[in-house]
Image (cartoon, rainbow, N blue to C red):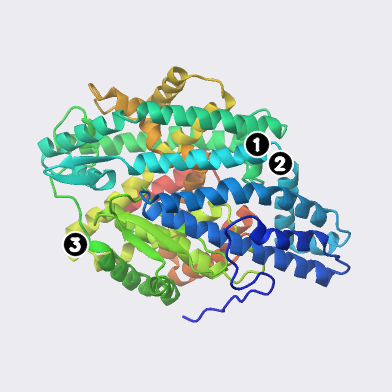
Amino acid sequence: MKLTQHNRKFVKQDLQINTWSDIEGYYTNLLSRAIASKEELIQWLKDKSELEAVLEEDLAWRYIKMTIDTRDEDLSSSYTEFVTKIQPEIAPFEDQLNKKLSESSLISDLEKDVAYQIYLKGVKTALELYCDENVPIEAEINEKSQQYGAISASQSIEHEGNVLTMQKAASFLKETDEALRKLIFIKIHNRRLEDIEKLDQLYSELIQLRHKIAVNAGFENFRDYKFKALGRFDYSKEDCFEFHNSIKRSIVPMVKEIQKNRLSKLGKAKFKPWDLEVDPEGKQPLKPFEGGERLLEGTVNMLKKIDPYFADCLVMMNKMGHLDLDSKAGKAPGGYNYPLYESGVPFIFMNSVGAQRDLVTMVHEGGHAVHSFLSRDLELTGFKSLPSEVAELASMSMELLTMPYWDEFYTNEEDLKRAKKEQLEGIIKILPWIAQIDEFQHWIYENPHHNVSERTEKWMQLNKEYGTGLTDWTGYEKSLETGWQRQLHLFEVPFYYIEYGIAQLGALGVWKNSISQPEKGIKAYKEALKLGYTKSIPDIYKTANVEFDFSEAYINELAEFVQNELEKL
């Protein structure tokens, strides 16, 4: 793979960003520059875009390094310095640049292009939302939300003389030895109990700060503010409510049937909390690989069979040192693909422990990575800044597109079928959780002055509506009451979660297309990803040849398709 080198034309090649003064001159240049023609306006946008890419990549590396080793105080300080000292200085200039653009008499020439229409809609939204009072509050929120990762990363348990990260410990919950599962669950449960109050307090503080931002910007609540800030131009809160209700009516009963079948095989009347991940037939947990190197090798081999370009993307990332796959002490939890807008070569961060879930995470983040590559040459950084409904379509589709090639990791036919079954059942089971987290957030920010007790009461009500009622939590009620605390999005990226549900529906459509018309299906998927955010979300889905639809009828149709595929296994 040969990549076009993005050489800087506006920002100095050797720029080192230590303080605001290092970049202030670029903003004053853009603000004071005269723009007399469409060509000069486009060049101004390109220069602004280049500056944005440089700054976003600088912040990205600070975040990546901090999450790889949360124990290194210098790395944490470097990230904090940017979000508390540099970003607040940038914000007023960004607002002034947006005003300069929106007030230009030449803007009508740009609005004839669909890509610019969407970009300019985002600029208009930013102008409407900007408020000087919110700049220091945003900085405080950025600093506070970072505490969640540090708290989570510090959680570990001891087992047989070894210190296990929570990710590693969770892998024991798939073991067939119930006594071992129970022991590990209790250790995890007890360790999390230590941080419940700390996380409750942190979340309460974040809610109040976010509510203050919304009120300052003229909104009744943070939900309404955030919907606008996220650029949700293509669907409303009412559509989200329809999604919640469709999931309750169509998917929850399906999950209950899956769980009843598992219970029957386990020979129990109800699950215990440590039974939820174990194979009901007493089979050992799937362990498709050992170590990050094997995970990468196998993933590259699979992607080659779908489209050689997909494989080349990961090979390039590995060559450039843009992969950190294995779980280790001090690493922040979770996994992500961080787009690097200047180089155009993203970074994948993971906590792999050799489990089937890690294989799925790898191809999921690989889907994001491919998306970054396919959209890297779009003209403006803003064209590559994707709404999550589009970003997650890329990643969730890749999970399903790789399934026919999982024999790269599974030579045993039964294990292969089991892995595929776990994946499809997992999709069905995760949809209620996504809807529950989203409905929880709507309530949280519609009722920002609630107390911890009221929050717990609401969460437990939602547990009943979205759960199956098939698990006995006696003695471990606190785990159920605080299950939301393990959802990173609530703390760090509020309202960014329903996108996973929306995109999952789209991904099922992409997979369905790839089965009926393999070549055409993959081509449509790639064409959609190449668009970045230069078309509306429904138009991007249409390019991928899938529906953008939350209705009960459509969700029923997809559920039936998945059920048929499960029966084949």
Spot occupied by residue 197 in the image (x, y as percentages of width and height): 38, 26
Distance from disc 3 to disc 2, alpha carbons, whole Å, reads 55 Å
Spot occupied by residue 408 in the image (x, y as percentages of width and height): 26, 68
Q: Which mark is residue 129?
A: 2
Q: Nearer the viewer, mark 2 or mark 1?
A: 2
* Amino acid on which the number 3 mark rests in the picture: Glu
Q: Quadrant of residue 132?
A: top right
**Tags 2 and 1 touching, CB below 8 Å:** yes
Give 428 or 76, whichever is nearer the viewer.
76
Q: Nearer the viewer, mark 3 or mark 2?
A: 2
Distance from disc 3 to disc 1, alpha carbons, whole Å, reads 50 Å
Q: Quadrant of residue 201?
A: top left
The residue located at (72%, 48%) in the rendering is 92
Q: Earlier in the sequence, mark 3 or mark 1?
A: 1
* Amino acid on which the number 2 mark rests in the picture: Leu
Q: Which residue is mark 1?
A: 225
Q: Look at the picture and state if 126 lies above or below 31.
A: above
* Amino acid on which the number 1 mark rests in the picture: Tyr
Q: Look at the picture and state if 186 lies above or below 334.
A: above
Q: Which residue is mark 3?
A: 413
